[in-house]
Amino acid sequence: MADDEQNDERDEGQRRVLDPEQDAAALKALTHPLRIRLLGMLRQDGPATASELAVRTGESSAATSYHLRVLAKYAFIAEAEHRDGRERRWRAVHSVTSWSNKAMEASPDSHAFVGLARRTQIEHLEASLLRHEADMAEGRLGREWVEASGIDDMLPSLTPESLTELQETIERKVAELAARDAGDPRARQVVFVAAGLPLAPRDADRDEARG
């Protein structure tokens, strides 16, 4: 999931844009941590059954089945295929869930959802790092990925306009490169996380405390 200020028409159909007023019930459905996790797994790893997801999450198949039905009710997922007499498989309907940060300030519930979603993204990054390290160590990825992979931690000073421009530029470039590499047998799924989190000066904290 990603918080986003604009609905970009170029990936319409791949992006679910949530509105805090029109999608209040859907937002509430996504506040359950296991539902967010299940949706993320279907997006990252493709269609799966409740039983398969139960094994991956350590939950019971009854629990995953229930939460999958809730996600389906609000059109985050849909049935991937139906095999006679076999368990239902589910797929993610959209590759990205986004929203307007300004719109999400409208209510305490939608504001809280943004915080939960961001913390879940950090947890996903940690899990992805562990998976990446295991894939490299156990030879599931070639050595050509050693130099290309990594995490950057930068602290530029930017205006709100420049931060917005930076985020939009990154998104456009990622889409451009993904389109260029589509069909290349060397391409692998990459977890790419970009965060722009402005921080107030430490002096501002002290001044507020004195006030």
Image: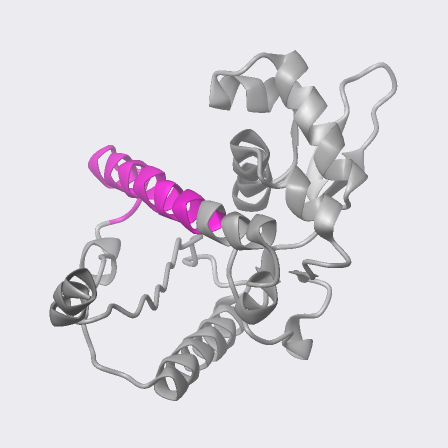
Q: Is residue 179 above or below residue 45?
A: below
Q: Position of residue 14 (x, y in %)?
A: 67, 61
The x, y position of residue 131, in whole percent, is: 32, 37
Is 54 situated above or below 3? above
What's the residue at 72%, 50% (across, down)?
A: 24
Left or right, 107 with respect to 133, comes to right
Question: Can residue 76 be seen at all in this image of the molecule?
Answer: no
Residue range in magenta is 117-142
Residue 126 within the magenta-colored segment of the rendering: yes
**Image-based side of 149 in relation to 49, left or right:** left
Image quadrant of residue 133?
top left
To which quarter of the image does residue 71 belong?
top right
Where residue 36 appears, x then y in whole percent?
55, 39
Residue at image position (58%, 12%) is 60
Q: Which residue shows up at 43% across the image and 58% down it?
A: 187
The residue closer to the viewer here, 109 or 69, is 109
In the rendered image, residue 169 lying in the magenta stretch gets the answer no
